[in-house]
Image: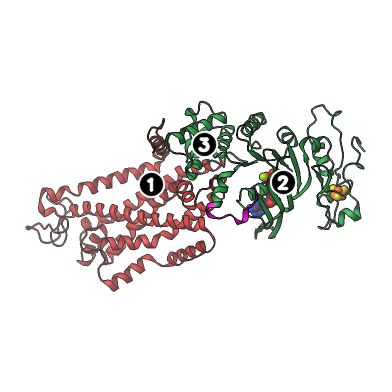
Chain colours: A green, B red
Amino acid sequence: MPEPILKLEEVSKTYRTKGSMFGGRAAGLVKALQCVSLEVLKGEIFGLVGESGSGKTTAGRLIVKLESPESGRVLLNGEVLSTLRGRRLKAYRRRVQMIFQDPYQSLNPQLSIYESVVEPITIHRLAAGRERMERVLSMIQTVGLSPPESFVNRYPHQLSGGQRQRVAIARAMVLEPDFVVADEPTSMLDASYSAKIFNIILEMRKRFGITILFITHSLAAARYLCDRIAVIYRGHLMEVGTAAEVIHHPLHPYTRALIDALPKFGLAEQIPRYNTLLEEERAGVEAVGCPFFMRCRKAHRTQCGREVPGLEPVGPGRFVACFFPGNGGGAGGKGS
Amino acid sequence: MDNGERFDTSRMKRSHWAAHFLEGWSVFIQNPLGKAGVGLLILFGLMAAASVIPPWIDPMYRPMTGVDPEIVRSVGPSLKHWLGTDFMGRDLFSQLLAGARIAFMVGVSAAFMTVVLGTAIGMTAGYMGRTVDTLLMRLADIIMVMPTLLFVLMLAALFGQLNIWTIVLIIGLFRWPGVSRVIRSQTLSLKQRPFIEAARVAGASHLRIIFRHIMPNVLPLSFLYMTFRVTSAITIEAALAFLGFGDPGTVSWGMMLQWVWKTGHMFKAPYWLLPPGICISLITLSFYMLGRAMDEVLDPRLRKEEDA
Ligand SMILES: Nc1ncnc2c1ncn2[C@@H]1O[C@H](COP(=O)(O)OP(=O)(O)OP(=O)(O)O)[C@@H](O)[C@H]1O
Ligand code: SF4
Ligand SMILES: [Mg+2]
């Protein structure tokens, strides 16, 4: 079994929101991540799946050190991130890269494609002169912008969203990093374009042996791309396992609800409906119990409402945070 | 750039800016305000350039020292003196031309100083945030509420006549806060944008982020503010000169007005009073129109880049 390259140890992150004086919003705390622990193994594509606002981007930003955890530790190759300063931080920046969600925002409009992609090489003094240029050109070719010479002189506003995202991928990959966080790289693009971007990511892994944290709200994308996935809900990890197992045999009521929500395209017979979602959310929920309590059909009022279920192993490499995982809700219990 | 690159990045950079400029220019020149502003400025530019001609024709046309020996008082327009002469027989037309040169000099150099200072301070405050931001912006508040003119008057009263470059320097030191506020807020919004974060993730230093990623995105705004600052610098200099605190060694339009007033020709010599007065109004107006037209050109483009 390959060793873990990235570790999150009981990481929590809380944002303080200012609240607007006139909008009637009170200042408050948003718990974006709560006591999240996970390991990503060398060479795998690890999927972080969850709905909007569940804390996926926050996790990614912690890993690339755009943000610091409030408590807990993030480790890459055994190095604790919060201790990195100066030269070691810069070395870390070379090894860990991020592909951002919105390609319309992640490229400087004033820089040409060449200037954007060459910048990381210049910063880390990896090459100069002709060699540097060759590296940029070949990377632009690798991400499928061909011939590269016809793209290098252009500016972001002259490219489509998909082409921009390819440039952003080239910028991240040109450093040949060990670890890449890909934050919903296709969510701003046409669905038809997603598969192309996915294939580039797969190609990159094959070629450079990169480990990837792939953030997505789509189980289908995670199934296509990932070796293992973790399902996150409101800052809590709900279920971890191999992509195939989690999607074909989901154990957590929330994962099941996500699978219910997948479009079926007439394949309803092959995909069991779990029906774990309440029609109406529970009212008057104390903030102490299971984070999914208010929407969970299976919830046990006394236990689930009072205690937070921990992420417990239920099999080799399989973890679930639920007091009543799997059975009991009834797989295939259609229209219960 | 490196030798032997297959494409020339610096040339490409120039053409990028050239394309931006041409695109902006074509919108700009269709704007009636822009047209009028540019037209007037060309006129004043010609005046400033032409100011070297009269002294070259005859020493008596030297704006400061040249005196027509046959006339030693103020007389109205004639063929020899198109706008007439001042109280000691100096040619008013030559003075008016020289005044255009001074106006450009004072206006542009003071505005340049304000804008460089304002941009640098605004970017620093916005980017660094926290204490640095608070300190710089408090300083800006303090300077902003100090009336520039009054302060210069006090200095002049303390140190006697001020040199024209001292005046420029003081205007520069006093007028940056407005620019810095605008640049600061622009920097604040740029700082949040993912391309800045991407640069951080790539390992870019603070200096690189400021100069490579933030500055090119705020410069159009700085440039816009420069035109408005030219207007205010010219007005301040004129007011100072009129009140008698100008540089006695230069012939500015404000100086001309001061001489009309001091020698009691205010209501007797309209040929002397009106030209500098009209010129001051028109040149400030033309820079203002230029700025407004530029505002209209830049604004949609800034917006377009934001959501493009
Ligand atoms: N800078 C911030 N300040 C305050 N709150 C924030 C900030 N960034 C994120 N949050 C909040 O933290 C929570 C998690 O946000 P995050 O961006 O990690 O979610 P996400 O899973 O990436 O969602 P999406 O799929 O919409 O991108 C959200 O409730 C969000 O409103
Ligand atoms: S712990 Fe209880 S409330 Fe939470 S998901 Fe499991 S059954 Fe539902
Ligand atoms: Mg996100």
Residue range (magenta): A76-87
Chain letter of the residue beneath label 2 in the structure image: A
The part of the image, by quadrant, that contains residue B236 is bottom left
Label 1: which residue?
Answer: B290
Say which of marks 3 and 1 sits in front: 3
The percent position of residue A226, horizontal first and vertical second, equals 72, 36
Q: Does label 2 lie on the same chain as label 3?
A: yes
Label 3, label 2: how many angstroms apart (C-alpha)? 36 Å
Q: Secondary structure at mark 3?
A: helix
Label 1: few (<14), some (14–19) or many (≥20) C-alpha neighbours in 10 Å: many
Measuring from the top left, give residue B180's x and y in whole percent. Answer: 45, 57
State the image coordinates of residue B116 (x, y, percent, origin top left): 39, 54
Amino acid at the residue labelled 2: Glu
Q: Quadrant of the N terminus of chain A?
A: top right
Residue type indicated by callout 1: Leu
Of residues A96 and A42, the one nearer the viewer is A42
Q: Chain of mark 3?
A: A
Residue A83 relative to residue A137: left or right:
right
The residue indicated by pointer 3 is A156
